[in-house]
Amino acid sequence: MTAHVLVCDPIAEDGITLLKRFGAEVDVRTGLTADELRATVDSYEALIVRSETHLTREVIEAAGKLQVIGRAGIGVDNIDVQAATEKGVVVVNAPTGNIISAAEHTIALILALARHIPEANASLKGGRWERKRFLGLEVRGKTLGIIGLGQVGSEVARRARGLEMRVVAHDPFVPDERARSLGVELIPLEELLRESDFLTIHTTLTEGTRHLIGEEELRQMKPTARIINTARGGIVDEGALDAALKDGRLAGVALDVFETEPLTSHPLFENEKAVVTPHLGASTAEAQERVAVDVAEQIIAVLKGEPAQYAVNAPLISPETYTYLAPYVPVASKTGSLAVQLYEGQMGKIEVDYSGEIAQHDVTPLKAAIVGGLLAPISEEHVNVVNVDVVVQRRGMEMTEVRSPSHDIYSSLITVRLSTSGGETKVSGTLAADGPHIVLIDDFWVDIPPGEGYLLVCENRDRPGMIGTIGTLLGQFDVNISFMNVGRHEKRGTALMVITLDEALTPDQLDEVRKVPDIFSAKLVRL
């Protein structure tokens, strides 16, 4: 049967040629409205989009024959992946095609800031010869601070080292050995802010990284420092940036991404210390060719019934294995996600223990879910059974797996241990009749049932009135409690109080919790 492919956004001709060579009939129809897309999608087995077209639940549910959606790029924010999963549609992307282009654009912006290239170009084209006005500086010997030492950040580091810059980085999830191999020194964020002459950002936009660089962070930087963001709009507070430039607390910024896109007017556009480009990080002919070919290859693999290396939502395991392990996948994901939100310090070793009946099976799907949970707060990288080992190796994660044939309490238990410079964090999860349960945090047995929301985790002295004190304080904050559990080793010793909240606490509110007498630590994580 001939496969029909609809290309909704412009992609390089190389990808279309590859699909036609496979035997697919390819229709290129860009600029379709949501209604037009819903009306026509039922005729296709595959769709290809970039960032312009939004594949909503309504569109996906209207697709009767659809087998695969391809995103010619890394992000899948414009695709309702959950709806695709429910429909049995595989979502694939091309996460590596634009790495070099994004890294090179970052270096270009660093040099543009250092040598005032955009302003000098505009000045000379405007009929002015102003050599003295555009006195620049050399980047050799300057300190480049990198936030996020993933694929793009690592390539930026390599190029900066070639420019003889000192490179430091902040990425709690990168082992020291990996950083040393790149010639990079890992340091805390506060130290990086103080020392950087140039600061470049290469992390994804999550709830935890939104306005990661705000007013407080900008005040820690040198007035001669310059900031570059080619990652995601919203990681840097644009209002705080504008104020810092106008007050002379920052020498320059270069932005390729913005909180709202597209846009043609912004206060930063009026400041000559700001260099701006319209999201050009991946806009090279080579990158567009790579992502087009990559996504075409993924689509062809799925249509042929073969594994797709960058499948976002499709664990490729045998039906028998999946039938047994599928309920444990959310257990594994939640265990990894909770562990990475609770740990402190620089990431070291990761140990996973599969205990009980699950240890008798191929646990690769569980490993993929754990790694995906670990990376979720810091990366857009989608992990599945096909690419989990590649992801672990590429990120330099020191990960070991242990199988225990039985457990004293549970028929099956998944335990994730993170060894860091700040100590060890341990989280265990299991499956109950109502879904995933977290049953151990560090050495405290607890029981956190399924659900969404926020978890307040307090280590405290076990004494009368502690639960009431925290409950009263949360009431004053107008934050509702949906569940509470306490684990302890002995009476009036150290206890762990876990409280599920309907809303997040603000940083100030969390500080108030930490000030309560006999509270040793308090952390807020998202379930």
Image: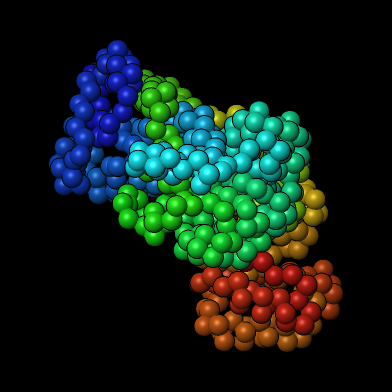
Q: From the viewer's perspective, is residue 296 above or below residue 422? A: above
- Residue 330 locus on image (x, y percent): 54, 49
Report whether residue 68 is seen.
yes
Front residue (pair 221, 29): 221
- Residue 311 locus on image (x, y percent): 45, 33
Query: What colour scheme was applied to this rendering of the protein?
Result: rainbow
Residue drawn at 63 percent across, 64 percent down: 219
Farthest top residue? 21
Residue drawn at 57 percent across, 57 percent down: 250
Quadrant assignment, res 45:
top left
> If the image is split into quadrants, where does the N terminus sit?
top left
Front residue (pair 499, 182): 182
- Residue 57 locus on image (x, y percent): 29, 49
How many numbered marks, from 0 up? 0
Q: From the viewer's perspective, is residue 131 above or below residue 270? A: above
> If the image is split into quadrants, where does the C terminus sit?
bottom right
**Left or right position of 70 against 66:** right
Report whether residue 65 is seen.
no
- Residue 406 locus on image (x, y percent): 74, 44
Front residue (pair 163, 77): 163
**Left or right position of 322 against 32:** right
Q: From the viewer's perspective, is residue 277 above or below residue 300? A: below
Quadrant assignment, res 291:
top left
Residue drawn at 57 percent across, 53 percent down: 251
**Left or right position of 27 against 440:** left
Quadrant assignment, res 43:
top left
Residue drawn at 63 percent across, 74 percent down: 510
Q: From the viewer's perspective, is residue 24 above or below residue 342? A: above
